[in-house]
Image (cartoon, rainbow, N blue to C red):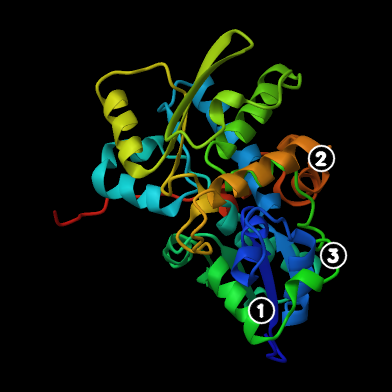
């Protein structure tokens, strides 16, 4: 943090702002996003970015990938790739589905990639002088950041990952009173986010965000009903079928790998009505990740989820494709979704892993 020759930057996952307060004695479901930005600056981070920005970027890439697969008869259903435990599960136990896994990097890795490319270029900084930290709800994000595929020119997208609990301990160690911090915004150019990006923190949120933007990208119109109730809540498996233009699109959401196994087995046996499947390793999604505060309140996860839904309900920018900072990133740097440059920086590949049983 205080190395004179390094610029230490940080990003935080969508769910962290509604959970980190619990580590410091606040009630479950308390959104402390602005206070957390202030606290991270007091710790010494030179830039504070919101990973919900790259959740929006993920939707632009993944939504375009889904449309391309539908139009060009490429492998379907498209499987989400945000949860590293889930991706590793496919690599180990369902390698025949690797062609179905989205090539999009997770929002964490996308943010790391554009920090060390677009941001470094814009600020005239040598990317080797940037130390990029992410604060995540998930212990498996440490594994993901260390994957050999997650590098550009031998530079890792992400240099270090802290869990929500580790951030809480760090704030305590530095004597920072989170509750009494002022509210501060995230830094440009990766500070704006839609509420769709924020929904990534709950099971079903990736699918709901994707449907909102895929509907627009396919029809040129906004989805009439923004809140997709069928994809919300804590049920371990949820499904919805929506009419998008002339196509009935099938979407499934699974939280917990045993439930994902059930859906994959159905697809393996011939089920063909699903176009997109979102899977989160942790039951409930990232709000219940392995790096989140351990709360004895049995309603804590539901309260965290309801806070994310309230944010979505009360803010104006609710769709990823209307995020102006994301659109500016395409205009000034990436070109368009799924462009050659986007594939170089924002996409990756996976391979079968041998596992002893």
Residue 165 image-quadrant placement: bottom right
- The residue nearer to you, when weighing 344 against 313, is 313
Tell me: 122 left or right of 81.
right
Front residue (pair 227, 131): 227
Q: Classify 10 Å Cα crowding around label 1: few (below 14), some (14-19), many (20 and above).
A: many
Q: Which mark is residue 315?
A: 2
Res 324 label: none
Residues tagged 2 and 1 counted as in contact (Cβ below 8 A): no
First in sequence: mark 2 or mark 1? 1
Of all residues shown, which one is farthest toward the top?
246
Task: Choose between 117 and 174: the one closer to the eye.
Answer: 174
Q: Quadrant of residue 187?
A: bottom right
Q: Does 277 sit above or below residue 342? A: above
Helix, strand or loop under label 3: loop
Pinpoint residue 89: horizontal percent, then vertical percent.
Answer: 32, 48
Q: Is residue 298 visible?
A: yes
Disc 2 to disc 1, C-alpha distance: 29 Å
Q: Residues within 10 Å of mark 3 (few under 14, many from 20)?
A: some
Instruction: Report, in whole angstroms, how far the alpha carbon at label 3 lies from the one at label 1.
Output: 17 Å
Q: Which residue is pictured at 70% across the width and 17% down the height?
A: 219
Q: State the SS at label 2.
A: loop
Whole-percent x and y of residue 317? 81, 38
Q: Is residue 139 left or right of residue 345?
A: left
The label on residue 184 is 3
Distance from disc 3 to disc 2, alpha carbons, whole Å, reads 17 Å
Residue ranking furthest to the bottom: 4
Question: Can residue 105 be seen here?
Answer: no
Q: Are marks 3 and 1 in contact (CB under 8 Å)?
A: no
Decide: few, some or many residues near mark 2? Use Cα within 10 Å; few <14, some 14-19, many ≥20: few
Rendered image: mark on residue 171: 1
Q: Secondary structure at mark 1?
A: helix
């Amino acid at each position: 943090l205080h190395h004179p020759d390094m610029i230490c930057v940080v990003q935080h996952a969508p769910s962290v702002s509604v959970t980190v307060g619990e580590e410091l004695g606040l009630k479950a479901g308390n959104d402390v996003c602005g206070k957390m930005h202030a606290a991270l600056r007091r710790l010494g981070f030179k830039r504070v970015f919101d990973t919900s920005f790259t959740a929006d970027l993920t939707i632009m890439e993944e939504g375009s990938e889904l449309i391309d697969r539908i139009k060009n008869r490429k492998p379907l259903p498209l499987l989400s790739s945000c949860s590293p435990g889930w991706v590793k599960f496919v690599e180990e136990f369902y390698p025949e589905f690797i062609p179905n896994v989205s090539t999009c990097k997770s929002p964490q890795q996308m943010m790391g990639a554009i920090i060390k490319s677009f941001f470094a270029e814009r600020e005239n900084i040598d990317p080797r002088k940037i130390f990029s930290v992410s604060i995540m709800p998930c212990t498996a994000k440490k594994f993901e950041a260390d994957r050999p595929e997650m590098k550009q020119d031998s530079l890792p997208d992400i240099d270090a990952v802290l869990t929500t609990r580790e951030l809480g301990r760090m704030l305590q160690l530095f004597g920072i009173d989170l509750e009494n911090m002022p509210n501060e915004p995230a830094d440009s150019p990766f500070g704006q986010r839609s509420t769709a990006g924020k929904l990534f923190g709950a099971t079903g949120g990736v699918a709901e965000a994707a449907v909102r933007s895929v509907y627009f990208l396919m029809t040129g119109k906004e989805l009439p009903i923004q809140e997709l109730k069928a994809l919300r809540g804590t049920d371990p498996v949820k499904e919805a079928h929506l009419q998008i233009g002339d196509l009935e699109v099938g979407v499934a959401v699974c939280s917990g790998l045993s439930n994902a196994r059930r859906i994959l087995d159905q697809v393996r046996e011939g089920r063909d009505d699903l176009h997109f499947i979102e899977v989160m390793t942790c039951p409930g999604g990232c709000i219940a990740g392995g790096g989140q505060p351990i709360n004895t309140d049995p309603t804590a996860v539901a309260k965290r989820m309801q806070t994310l839904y309230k944010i979505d309900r009360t803010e104006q920018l609710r769709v990823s494709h209307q995020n102006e900072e994301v659109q500016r990133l395409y205009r000034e740097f990436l070109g368009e979704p799924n462009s050659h440059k986007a594939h170089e920086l924002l996409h990756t590949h996976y391979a079968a892993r041998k596992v002893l049983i």
